[in-house]
Image (cartoon, helix red, strand yellow):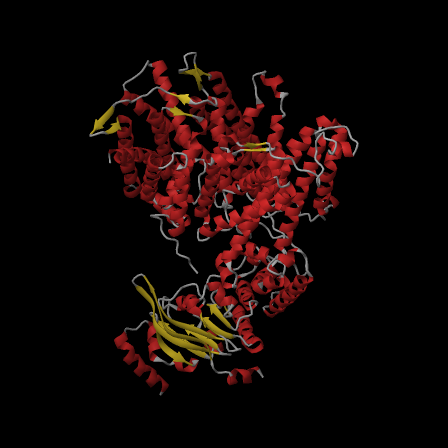
Amino acid sequence: MSAMASTMNNDAILKVEHLSMRFGGLMAINDLSFEVRRGEITALIGPNGAGKTTVFNCITGFYKPTMGMISMQQKDGKSFFLERMADFEVTRDAKVARTFQNIRLFSGLTLLENLLVAQHNALMKASGYTVLGLLGFKSYKDASKEATEKARYWLEKASLIDRADDPAGDLPYGAQRRLEIARAMCTGPELLCLDEPAAGLNPRESQELNKLLRSIRADNGTSLLLIEHDMSVVMEISDHVVVLEYGQKISDGDPAHVKNDPRVIAAYLGVDDDEVETVRHEVEEGAN
Amino acid sequence: MEYFIQQLINGLTLGSIYGLIAIGYTMVYGIIGMINFAHGDIFMLGGFAGLIVYLLIMTVFGGAPIAVALLCMLIVAMAATSLWNWSIERVAYRPLRGSFRLAPLITAIGVSIALSNFIQVTQGPRNKPIPQMVNSVYTIEGISISLKQIVIVIITVALLAAFWYIVEKTPLGRAQRATEQDRKMAALLGIDVDRTISITFVMGAALAAVAGTMFLMYYGVIVFTDGFVPGVKAFTAAVLGGIGSLPGAVIGGLLIGLIESLWSAYFTIAYKDVATFAILAFVLIFKPSGLLGRPEVEKV
Amino acid sequence: MATVTNPSTASTGSLTAKALREATFTAVMTFLMFVLFVGLKTDQNMRNELILVPRWGLLAIFVIIAFVGRFAMVAWLQPWRTARKAAKDAAPAQTTDAGFVKRNFSKLAILALVLYPPIILSLFGAQGSLKYIDNFGIQILIYVMLAWGLNIVVGLAGLLDLGYVAFYAVGAYSYALLSINFGFSFWILLPLAGILSAFWGIILGFPVLRLKGDYLAIVTLAFGEIIRLVLINWQDVTQGTFGISGIPKITLFGIPFDASPHGFAKIFNLPMSSAYYKVFLFYLILLLCLLTAFVTIRLRRLPIGRAWEALREDEIACRSLGINTVTTKLTAFAIGAMFGGFAGSFFAARQGFVSPESFVFLESAVILSIVVLGGMGSLTGIAIAAIAMVGGTELLREMDFLKHIFGPDFTPELYRMLIFGLAMITMMLVRPRGFVGSREPTAFLFERKNVSGSFTKEGHG
């Protein structure tokens, strides 16, 4: 069912067009265009310093791009221009959630509380912007229960339910990564952006993560955009790969295509531009 | 025009004193990221040390040439105040290093309360006036400059030069800058971080003591509560200039001195402090890290 | 056996040597530090000139105390503490069930506070009890309320506010001016003062939203000073440093506490005494405190309260979750300020007099230190800290018996703030995270486990 849905809705959920970002004299992103299709897992890869995280920060409103357009198309047809929105509006209104490369959890709050904070806007409305909640209205109590159930669902899904009442700072690294993803999912996003979700994970944790990401796509209908260094993760789970180098796109396509793209290989091996042709020959020879 | 220049000179004198105190704030903040609230009281302590030395010279030696007296006052005040700040750092701040950020702030407030009340208890709560030490006034084209003002500005400039040399050119300064950048790494590279921080406190206190002695000489009176207002103003100066930046502290101090004297001259003296604080708030709103502070890049 | 005792005697010997060395060092340092300030006293002679009066004896006492104290500490106290710590670590960790008192602490505390005035009245009589109800009871409760209000800003939202006393001043002057000029009653002005203070909280909040950490701290300090300076200088309205006196008293729903025929004493057929008013004020501030606590506890379980704590932990993460940090910070400032305003109008009504003297930076510092000493975010801890700090210093006013020891010239009152400052340092050194270092979670799935202080952050904004 879900597989069918994903093939049927192959339209773009996120369109990045001619995006440029300049920091002083440095052109971190230069005229970048790509698409994220609904129901797919798209990976953004590239060598260190290629500008991947900058792209993320532009998409999620943390940076204002120098030029370009980022449009988000929601299921119900509403569309948003993310580059015009404040960071919190991107999550609240456009339904794009994100995680961070260096995990940003509320370490002094419990896991459950972390997930409740993520449901802030829904709960805020239910509490009548605090007034009704302060007076102890039932509507807030119901909403609060519902939010707890949603949190429980995600804790189970991220296999963190046993530690629900422990502080987030007390979790091991891999579990913190999963919690951050669960927390982002609690905002109810249509597009989830993950910044190096597999960084620092051991192989077992990596497998758990892949499982979680796949199920997020399949069960929750959320599209994913992820930055990743770990090629095994990229190749295993992504449907579509975009490769960046020095802020420019050098390749775009399915994993198999990208894997054999000589420019990508050159970029990863650190080959000069004029040697790209040599690499291409080598690859082709190898393929033959 | 003469009036304006006159006020400019007054402002610069006052600003020099603020600048000297502000350096202590900014250095300590730079190196351990702590607002040393007691620094204003260290300044007051320096003033009192100067006062007591002055009285000692008067009673024991029956007076001395002004230059000698002033030099003695400065040296003893610097030594005594440094000793105090060194001990305070050892006892009240060092054990809290690396713990909760607000804890040293609260102990610093405690030290500030304790210091001013210590002076109140030991030296009495009344104003301590001394006779004019330096009272020549030169008048050039209707602008009068007192010798006091010249002395203050010269001493400030000389100290700043010496200080700049220490921070920029000596191994000690290098150790300080390294500790400021990354304390752990500095320790790994063999810098004695504790010692470096202690020296920073000592240097800050020495400058504050000079400011205190000059404050005493300029106004001719000191009282145990005198640490607070100049302390807050100097801290304001440090923040205005961009906390952590040494030239910023000096520029901030001069600016605050100028704002104060010009505001008192052209508007109402009653609202001079309001003007200072309002300008601080205004500058920070548009330049949240001060005039010369490194803008804090939001790392996402 | 000999092998066991030998090293220990050797170490005792070296320990004594070490203690002697350190004690000598401390004594020398003390001498150098105190020689100017204790050894010599500046005094005025008959001609109003400053003279120096030597006090070498006192200086010697200081040096001796430092020597003996340091020696005792190194030679006995430190080994004893290490030994005790080792013994503690060796002993199996005991998980004792929280006792009855601990479990019902807040209920018992409220009960004790409700019973406090009648017990004091019956013990000391109407006149004798004034001191205990007013100076200890009401005074401490005002600080409890202020600290709980500031706790919302500093403890929950992690925004360092050094000018909290400004809102207290706004509340006090609002009540004073509006009640004198327009004759409004306390019950109308109490909410009004709260709203005005909240409004000022937002006024302050707006410009400082972008500021972080210590920049925020200095601007809030500046704001507090600006308010105070305006109160001093705007003499037409505030009467400057003279202050405003003759502020109307609070009535109990229209029943005044005075000697008139409609007064409280006459109506209830009681002998005339000012104690009734004080008792009434005590219950009023207790009620206000409980309101503050109730609202704080409720707010923590509401999304806004959680957003505050999340803001303290990580602002960027908050924004990534769709939380509008601007409004979140502003509500923290506004609600914190509102409680300051409530406390202010109560203060004005209780004193019958307000002047800028009451709203100096020191007050902000004291309130902030109560919050930090209590353990940021913990209502119980803060209440304990308020009792210790405010009650402790009030107690110093009562130490008249010390005059018998140190002679009639000795005024313990003079040492009050010195001891206060030293106590602040000592308490912070002993418990850097405050009396209650752990955080109570606002929601739980299976069991409520307190979060250790080492995980919580203190905010950067």
Which residue is at the front of the view, A97 or A73?
Answer: A73
Q: Horizontally, is B146 left or right of A79 in the view?
A: left
Quadrant of the rendered structure where residue C276 is?
top right
**Which residue, as the protein is rendered here, is positioned at the far right?**
C269
Q: Horizontally, is A66 left or right of C318 in the view?
A: left
Image coords of residue B272 (percent x, y): 39, 37
Would residue A107 be seen by someone viewing this image from the given angle?
Answer: no
Q: Residue at x 37, y 69 (%)?
A: A47
Which residue is at the front of the view, C396 or C115?
Answer: C115
Which residue is at the front of the view, C307 or A161?
Answer: C307
Image coords of residue B54 (percent x, y): 35, 20
Pick the quarter of the image with the N terminus of chain C: top right
Q: How many marks?
A: 0
**Which residue, as the protein is rendered here, is positioned at the far front?**
C182
Which residue is at the front of the view, A262 or C228?
Answer: C228
Image coords of residue A155 (percent x, y): 61, 66
Residue C139 vs A250, above or below: the answer is above
Residue B253 vs A143, above or below: the answer is above
Would residue C450 be seen by someone viewing this image from the given angle?
Answer: yes
Residue C444 vs C250, above or below: the answer is below
Image coords of residue A21 (percent x, y): 35, 67
**Which residue, as the protein is rendered here, is positioned at the far left?**
B141
